[in-house]
Amino acid sequence: MSASDDMGLGRRRRPTRRRLGLWRWPLRAVLALVVLWLVGFAWFLGDIAEERPINPMPHAGGIVVLTGGADRVKAGLELLMAGAAPRLLISGAGNGTYLGDFTARDGIDANAKATDITVGHAAATTRGNARETAAWVSRHHIGSLVVVTADYHMPRALLELHRALPGVTLIPEPVRPPAMTNPGQPHMLKILVTEFCKYIVVRLRLGGIAAHSIKAHG
C-alpha cells in the first residue's frame, strides 16, 4: 500500500472516530437514565412490598376511598362500620353509581351509616381524587384522614393528597389486590411499570406539562 493510500485511509478513519465521539456522551446519558430508572423501580417495588395496614388503626376525622380497584370500597366501609372515623368519602365513583351499588356488591349493609357516607362523582384521575377529597375535607373540617387505595397506587395517591391537603394528617390503609400475589405476571408487571412512570411524573411535578401536551395533540 502506498503512502498516499495510507493518508486516504487515515482521513476516512478520523471522521468515523469523530462521529463515534459525538454519540458517546448521549449514549452514556441514556444508559445512566436506564440504570437510574431500574434502581428507582426496584425501590418502588420494595416500598410496595413493605406496605402494611396500621394496626391498631388510630381514630381519624374521616376516611377516603379512591375507587378503581377490587376490595377498596369494602375496606373503607369496614373501617367506617368499625368506628375508625365518623364519615366516609367514596371518591371517583362513576356517574350513575350510588351507595347501594357498592354495598350490594361488597356484601356490607351500610344503611345505618348512609348519612355519613358521601359518594363523589367529580374525579376521574388521582389528581381529581385529591381535589374532590380536599373540598370534602374542608366542608367537614377534617384534620386527619385514612386513605384507602391499592398498595401499588398508594405512593402516588399520598403525593397528590399531601399537596392538596397541607396540614392534614394522612393515614395510609393499603389494599393488596389479588393479582399482587404474583406481581411478575405480564399483566401486573405492566400495571406496576405504568404506575411507577406516573409516580415519577407526579414526583417531578410534570403532571401539568403532560396534561397540556395531551390536550395539544388530542
Image (spheres, rainbow, N blue to C red):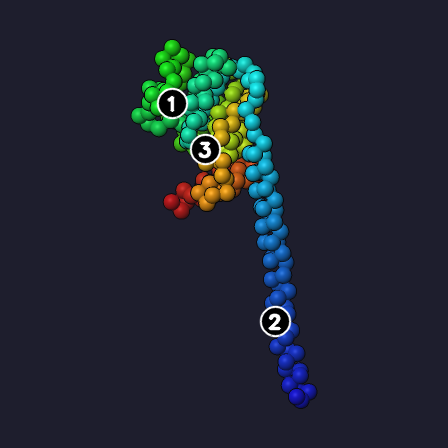
Name the residue carrying label 1.
106
Q: Name the mark nearer the viewer: 1 or 2.
A: 1
Of residues 50 and 61, which is closer to you in this image? 50
Left or right: where 124 falls relative to 195: left
Left or right: residue 69 versus residue 50 is: left
Can see residue 22? yes
Quadrant of the image occupied by residue 81? top left
Q: Is residue 31 above or below residue 108?
A: below
Query: What residue is rendered at 41% in x and 42% in y?
Result: 215
- Type of the residue with mark 2: Thr
CA gap, disc 2 and disc 3: 55 Å
Label 3 – label 1 distance at C-alpha:
15 Å
Q: Earlier in the sequence, mark 1 or mark 2?
A: 2
Q: Position of residue 179 (x, y in %)?
A: 45, 36
Q: Residue at x 63, y 56 (%)?
A: 28
What residue sits 40% from the left and 47% below the top? 217
Judging by the rendered image, the residue that carries numbered circle 3 is: 178
- Dot 3 surroundings within 10 Å: few (below 14), some, or many (20 or more)? few
Residue shown at 63%/80% (left/top)?
A: 9
Question: What's the distance in space between the residues labelled 1 and 2, CA to CA?
Answer: 67 Å
Label 1 environment density (alpha carbons within 10 Å; few <14, some 14–19, many ≥20): some
| Residue 163 picture location, percent across and down | 54, 28
According to the picture, the residue beneath numbered tag 2 turns out to be 16
Furthest-bottom residue in this view: 2
In what element is the residue under mark 2?
Answer: helix
N-term-proximal mark, 2 vs 3 = 2
Extreme residue toward the top, this view: 112
- Residue type highlighted by circle 3: Pro
